[in-house]
Amino acid sequence: MTRLRLFMAMTVFLSLLTSPSVWADNLEGCRVQSSQNQVVSLGFPVRKERLSYISKPRILVIPFKLKDNPSYIFSESIKADYLTAAKNILEFSNGKASIEFVFAPTVSSDLTNADMEQLKINQQQQWQKDESKSTWGFVRKFIADNDPTLNYSGIDAVIIEGSSTSRFSDIAEAFMFWQNPQNPWFRSIQTSEGTINNAVLLDNDSSQETITHEIMHLFGLTDLYGSDTGPARLSLMASNDLNLLSYEKWVLGWLPDSDVTCVSNLSNSSIINFSFDYSKMDQLAVLRAPNEDAYVVETTKWGGNKVLILYSLNNEGRPPITMYHEKSYARFVPTEISNFRAIGAELVSPKHTLLVTNIEANRLSLSFAPNNFINTTEYKDLVTKASQVRAILEEQFQTKAAAELKAKQDAEERLAAEL
């Protein structure tokens, strides 16, 4: 590249780096309300009974031995899975949630594998019907039956660890109790030492990922699987991957408000420009329009790579999240933002499009446009400038790569000549 051409390119490049106007409203307008009809949801406030309000929750793990599995032992390997789950949550929370497990002696039971298989069948069939046959009734009775011999003092949650050997009896279910006068099904469990509001039933040797997933329900998170438009590997609540969405962390109080951008009155007649601190992994923007689902834009990680995602949030939906993908893709794939090649990417929802306008050393610049603006001069100019920036950076990258390759070849030729 000649000096004149380089100077002109850099002049254009610097002109394109003009910082867009950053939109930021008061965060309170972007705290999406929690569901009034569901036990847990991705909204504010998290119910007061959940573990997210406790920095050092104590969880009692009670293993129980089935009558037809007399040789069962709560092994060190199972215990290690629980300790790993605690470590996972400590990392999710950036040190804000430190779980202490209390491991009770193994309890002998008159139940059999066949009983646990039937309980698995009843898990769905008896939901809010016959409590005595349901998993909810099972958990209440188990905790009450063992109240005389176990000390629940200072315990914030209970995990009942089963010992089935039948592949038809695997159960992994969280129980989030809360005071609901209209529905006593969710009432708290009363023990001699106090109230239990959080419990988990695990049967058939659950993995540390499953243990972590179920405990995250007790903190206040909801399931995100069940559709083709969910976050998949981006969240443990939708997969077995040990990751959480930035928005999930914010709801639990694990992402500081300083990393959140709020647009509380999203307009269908203007383009919103905002930016993220690119030096940080978890950055979040919540954009809300009257009488519509909220939009969430965030950076998070996918397979160790930093990615950008766009989704809508409706806390009355199951699952509540709908992911949107790049215009050039046929399905959802997170947009990697590890280098300049993401500049110009467009993530499209039914009503809005998110455009990556620039990626600099410490800033990711974004524009959120109504779809009826896509053909306007204003939006087309943004796309053109993003394309020019990407082209300039691509040329610089290729020039640098060619120079490095030539230097390497010259060094190899010199070495060969010396030999």
Image (tube, helix red, strand yellow):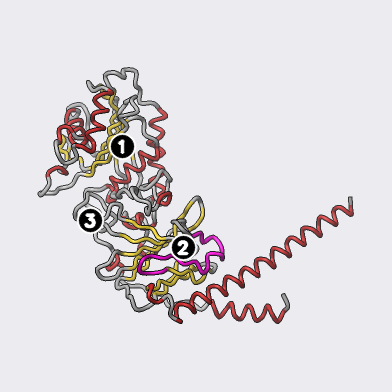
Q: Residue at x 39, y 45 (%)?
A: 239
Is residue 402 visible in the rendered image? The answer is yes
Q: Position of residue 75 (x, y in %)?
A: 39, 26
Considering only order in the chain, which callout, 2 or 3, is on the residue closer to the N terminus? 3
Considering only order in the chain, which callout, 1 or 2, is on the residue closer to the N terminus? 1
Amino acid on which the number 3 mark rests in the picture: Ser
Question: Depth-wise, is mark 3 or mark 2 nearer the camera?
Answer: 2
Q: Residue at x 14, y 42 (%)?
A: 185
- Closer-to-camera residue (334/196): 334
Q: Which residue is mark 1?
A: 172
Label 3 – label 2 distance at C-alpha: 29 Å
Amino acid on which the number 1 mark rests in the picture: Ala
- Quarter of the image with the N terminus is bottom right
Residue 35's disc is 3
Q: Which residue is mark 2?
A: 326
Amino acid on which the number 2 mark rests in the picture: Glu
**Neighbourhood count class around disc 3 (C-alpha, 10 Å): few under 14, some 14–19, many 20 upward:** some
Segment tinted magenta in the rendering: 335-353
In the rendered view, would you say 89 is above or below 172? Answer: below
Q: Is residue 396 left or right of residue 145?
A: right
Residue 274: which quarter of the image? Answer: bottom left
**Neighbourhood count class around disc 2 (C-alpha, 10 Å): few under 14, some 14–19, many 20 upward:** many
Is residue 103 visible in the rendered image? The answer is no
Query: Which element is circle 1 on?
Result: strand
Query: Which element is circle 3 on?
Result: loop
Q: Position of residue 252 (x, y in %)?
A: 31, 54
Q: Is residue 302 left or right of residue 33?
A: right
Query: Which element is circle 2 on?
Result: loop
Considering only order in the chain, which callout, 1 or 3, is on the residue closer to the N terminus? 3
Residue 220's disc is none
